[in-house]
Amino acid sequence: MSGDVEQVAGWVRDARQIALLSGAGMSAESGVPTFRDAQTGLWAKFRPEELATEDAFRANPQMVWDWYAVRREMIAKVEPNAGHLAVAAFQRRHPNRLTVVTQNVDGLHQRAGSPGVLALHGNIAQDKWLDAPGDCCTHMEPVAGRPPRCAKCGNMRRPAVVWFGEMLPARELQAAEEAARRCDLMLVVGTSGAVYPAAGLARIARGKVVVVNPHASELDDAADVVLRGTAAALLPQLLEEGPG
Ligand code: BV8
């Protein structure tokens, strides 16, 4: 174990309250391409920020629906990695000592067994109505399609994720801010730190901030220690029971 890893492992042992903020890099070793790397095929010419918006969906519902369908299928085929599993195991050994705050919509922390995950950007496996549903929407099966629609008013189904320009779910955001303000240690894992307000949590952390990322990120300047490595390689080292 390198000196820095050993030092952070010591901080983990001493911390009463730990907050873990994760991004797409957390799931990269499960086979889920990061947000930056996800743009392949017919979506390659779009930046994610262009597709993950209500305007894009209204302008071309089928294209955006298909983009989510491909991501959903891919996510359904993968498994949590050693990083997700180390976090869930730590939470089982030390209940209520670590709070997972994730930008990921893939549900892999939850599938690894982590309790009380604060999913700031929603869950790609779920749908909701685009517009406020009328009686027609709720009383009839939506008509199949890409996307499915209300047979009467044409209201569309959309992925239950937070699109750019949309507010985050208030309960999760408030709980995440509280976790940041009371933590002794925040582990910032696999995020470029480019998207707000999620990235801002690392800047309001009360405790020490440790970035885990094989590449430079926009939150390196907020870190007390930057560990240049991957989530699946480093989290087991940081979270497993050390000697004594
Ligand atoms: C909002 C769900 C209020 C959808 C997502 C302040 C400043 C600037 C801009 C803003 C600001 N406040 C608001 C904004 C606007 C905007 C924003 O942040 N824009 C950015 C692009 C500049 N924010 C919003 O719109 C938010 N809403 O503010 O509402 C409001 C309302 C109206 C008007 C104004 C304000 C909503 C943001 C949420 C959008 N939804 N996802 C979907 O998934 O389709 S965001 C999505 O992108 C992800 O959830 C994630 O948050 C982000 C991607 O970032 P990362 O997860 O970090 O992934 P990335 O690929 O970038 O990086 C991966 C990292 O992993 C890399 O660093 C890499 O080195 C590392 N890595 C790779 N392999 C590994 C690894 N690390 C460890 N191990 C490995 N193996």
Image (cartoon, rainbow, N blue to C red):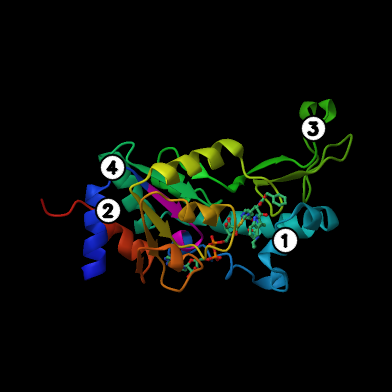
Marks 1 and 4, how far apart at CA = 40 Å
Q: Secondary structure at mark 1?
A: helix
Q: Is residue 123 left or right of residue 132?
A: left
Q: Is residue 13 magenta?
A: no
Residue at the limit of the structure toward the right, as seen here: 152
Q: Does 33 sit above or below residue 91?
A: below
Q: Earlier in the sequence, mark 4 or mark 2?
A: 4
Residue that badge 3 annotates: 133
Residue depicted at x 73% and y 63%? 50
Reading the image, the residue beneath label 1 is 51
Seen at 69% across and 55% down, the residue is: 164
Mark before the other along the chain sequence, 1 or 2:
1
Q: Position of residue 181 (x, y in %)?
A: 43, 44
User: How would you rate the neighbour count of disc 2 (Cα within 10 Å): few for under 14, some for 14-19, many for 20 or more?
Assistant: many
Q: How many marks?
A: 4
- At horizontal 19% and vertical 51% (from top left) the residue drawn is 241
Q: Amino acid at mark 2?
A: Leu
Rendering coords of residue 217 (x, y %): 48, 69
Kind of element beneath mark 2: helix
User: Which residues, given as a range, are shown in magenta?
Assistant: 19-26
Residue of label 2: 239
Q: Nearer the viewer, residue 163 or 138?
A: 163
